[in-house]
Structures are given as C-alpha cells and as structure tokens.
C-alpha cells in the first residue's frame, strides 16, 4: 500500500468519525429542545382539552376534562415500586360530542374486580399522552376475556372502549375513585453528548494511529533503500 493511499484512507476515516461526532451534537441540540418543549407543556397552566388532539402539538400537554364515565374500563398490567404488581385503570369518559380515555391511575392487583365498571361524573386535570409502549415482537396480545392489556395501546384500547384515539393521564381526579394517579414520565434519554465525545476520541485515536503508521512506513522504506 502506497503512503499516499494510506494517508488518504486515514484522513477519510478521521473525517467520517468527526462527522459522526458532529451529527451527535446536532442530535443533542434536537433532543434538548424536545425535552424543553415537553417540560414546558407539562408545566403550563392546564387548558381545556382541544377539539382536535395531535401528537405533534399536544403530546404531554396539561389539560382539563369534565365528563361522565361510561362504565367501560381497560386494565393495563404494570407494577408500582411501593405497592407491587397491579393495574393502570383506563376508563372511557364521554362529554358532548366526544369520548376519550382517562388513565385514572394505579390500583393493586387484588383490587382489579372493583374497577371493572366505573360510572358517574368526573373532572380531571392531566396530560395528553401518546404512549409508545407496544413492541410487536415482545408485547403479548391483550387478554380481552380477562380485560388485561400489557401496554397502553392506542390502537386496540380505543376499539375496546369505543373512544377516540385520545388518552389523558390524570394527575388530579374528582371525585376520588380510589385509584392512585401517576404523573406521566417521558423517559427520553439524552446521551448524545457522551456519544459525540466517543466519536471525537475515536477520530483522535484514528488520526494518531494513521500518523504513527505513516511515519513507520516511511522509515521502513528508507531502510529498504539503504545499500
């Protein structure tokens, strides 16, 4: 391999690694802005639930809703670090011209029978949420006979409860139905700065090894030409 070709190969490797580091910095800026938007939506004063709810503009938005529970519920199997295994109770609620899903919170596993049907007026403050919890490879299909879901599924739950594809995770519930409201956690990692540093260090190491090998090739060539 000629020294020129080797140098070009080394420079190309450094360029690719630096580009990957810069790309991670761009991702860092995007993720930081996204997290700031989420925190802003979650901390703003609650507004009445919009007539049209979209993922782009309303995910995590703090809203109010008043309506009537229809009796239909869906139970999402989960656990609470303090209580142990249990269910999130997702209830269908109706208001003039619409039907939405309300995540009323957590109940211990032995209390499930008490929440199969819920009726009555309800007033809540909560966050619109478009969960991304279903993995087609690993999430089991719901057990409809036992009313057990294994994720908050925005495809199957609305069909099961006959509602819009709108979920509100309640943080305040009136009256108290006996559930434990749980605030939405976005759980979005922001590790892009660490990834960027890794790529830049790899670029530095690649550059160092290229220079070292380039010098060694030159030295070897000079020795080979000695009489």
Image (cartoon, rainbow, N blue to C red):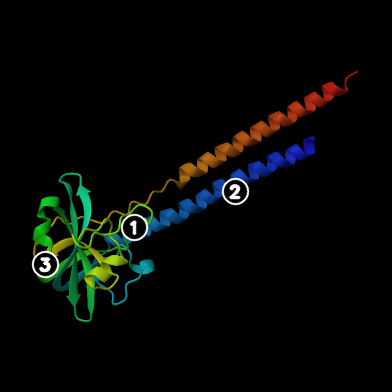
Q: Which sits earlier in the primary sequence, circle 2 or circle 3?
A: 2
Expressed as whole percent of the image width and height from the top left, the position of residue 31 reads 43, 54
Near-viewer residue (163 or 199): 163
* Label 3: which secondary element: loop
Circle 2 residues within 10 Å: few <14, some 14–19, many ≥20? some
For the C terminus, give its image quadrant: top right
Q: Nearer the viewer, mark 1 or mark 2?
A: 1
> What residue does disc 2 label?
19
User: In percent of the image, x 33 and y 67: which residue is there?
Assistant: 58
In the rendered structure, find residue 110 and report the number of the disc placed on it.
none
Mark-to-mark CA distance, 2 and 3: 56 Å
> Which residue is at the far bottom?
97
* Left or right, residue 99 beside residue 192: left
Q: CA distance from mark 3 to mark 1?
A: 26 Å
Depth check, mark 2 against mark 3: the one in front is: 3
| Residue placed furthest toward the right | 227
- The answer to whether residue 108 is left or right of residue 184 is left
Q: With respect to residue 74, does 216 lie above or below?
A: above
Mark 3 = which residue?
A: 118
Quarter holding residue 88: bottom left
Residue 134, labelled with which disc? 1
- Apparent side of residue 34 relative to residue 2 in the rendered image (left or right): left
Q: Are marks 2 and 3 in contact (CB under 8 Å)?
A: no
Q: Is residue 204 above or below residue 119?
A: above
State the image quarter where residue 166 is shown: bottom left
């Amino acid at each position: 391999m000629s020294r020129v070709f080797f140098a070009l190969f080394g420079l190309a490797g450094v360029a690719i690694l630096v580009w990957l580091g810069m790309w991670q910095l761009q991702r860092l800026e995007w993720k930081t802005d996204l997290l700031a938007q989420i925190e802003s939506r979650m901390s703003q004063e609650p507004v009445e639930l919009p007539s049209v709810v979209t993922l782009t503009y309303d995910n995590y938005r703090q809203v109010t809703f008043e309506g009537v529970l229809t009796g239909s519920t869906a139970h999402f199997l989960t656990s609470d670090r303090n209580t142990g295994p249990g269910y999130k109770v997702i209830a269908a609620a109706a208001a003039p011209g619409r039907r939405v899903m309300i995540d009323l919170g957590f109940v211990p596993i032995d209390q499930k029978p008490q929440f199969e049907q819920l009726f009555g007026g309800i007033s809540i403050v909560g966050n619109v949420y478009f969960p991304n919890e279903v993995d087609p490879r690993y999430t089991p299909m719901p057990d409809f006979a036992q009313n057990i879901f294994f994720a908050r599924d925005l495809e199957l739950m609305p069909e099961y409860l006959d509602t819009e594809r709108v979920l509100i995770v309640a943080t305040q519930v009136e009256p108290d139905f006996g559930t434990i409201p749980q605030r939405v956690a976005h759980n979005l990692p922001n590790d892009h700065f660490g990834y960027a540093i890794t790529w830049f260090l790899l670029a530095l190491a690649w550059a160092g090894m290229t220079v070292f090998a380039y010098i060694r090739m030159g030295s070897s060539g000079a020795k080979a030409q000695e009489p």
